[in-house]
Image (tube, rainbow, N blue to C red):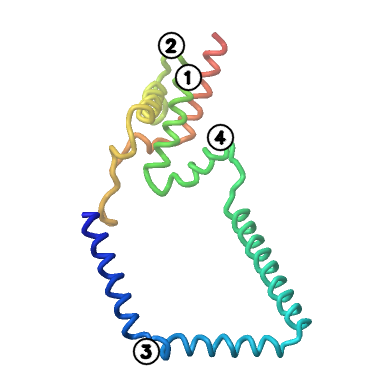
Amino acid sequence: MKRGRIALILAGLFVAIILAFFLQDVIRQAVVTPLAYTLWVLKLAYTFIPQLLLWFILLAVLIFLIISSLLKWYSARQIYEEHSKPAQGSVEILAGWVLKARKGNYYKWKIANRLGKLWSDRSGQYVDRRPKVSPDKNGSTRRDAQEAVKRYLKAGLDESFVDYPLPSLPFMRKQATPFDLNLDEAVEFLESSLEVRDGE
């Protein structure tokens, strides 16, 4: 393959040399003479321009290049500063998730996952030893509420938002998920669980 290419290149050079030998008058009239005339005109124009003016033009071009590069650097730096965001703490990140929770199940799951990790890290082998309470006015018990919160926290750890896809059509009813629990109930449960654990 390489030998064939080398042979083809050598043949092309040989043909070009032969054509240049026979067409030298045409090449001189079509290429060499116009090029030499253009160079002569440029040299003549250069001799008529004062040297001081040439230096001023060169200095102006140099200043223009420096200013344009500084402007590009400043605009790039300004764009970088606008796009760069200050580092956020865990509380700020969680607050942002709470604000975005209405958009879909992803941020609800992120909150449940974060609270579930906090619950599992802090509770350890904790067992709720508080006595059962009597039903409230609505007929439900606090124990049921605690079980719902535990289901929420476990879903945040063991499940994912992809297990509960959003409806494909806007008029379809949204599927209920464990992540729909009121966030206040989960926070209250975590606070009470940690208080009891610290008290024991």
**Image: 63 above or below 35:** above
Kindly identify which residue carries mark 3: 26
Crowd band around label 3 with a 10 angstrom C-alpha radius: few (<14), some (14–19), many (20+): few
Q: Are marks 3 and 1 in contact (CB under 8 Å)?
A: no
Could you tell me which secondary element the residue under label 4 belongs to? helix
Kindly identify which residue carries mark 1: 121
Q: Position of residue 97 (x, y in %)?
A: 48, 42
Residue 90, disc: 4
Kindly identify which residue carries mark 2: 125
Could you tell me which secondary element the residue under label 2 belongs to? loop
Looking at the rendered structure, the kind of residue marked 3 is Val
**Image: 34 above or below 87:** below
Quarter holding the C terminus?
top right
Crowd band around label 1 with a 10 angstrom C-alpha radius: few (<14), some (14–19), many (20+): few
Q: CA distance from mark 4 to mark 2?
A: 25 Å
Looking at the rendered structure, the kind of residue marked 4 is Ser
Looking at the rendered structure, the kind of residue marked 2 is Gln
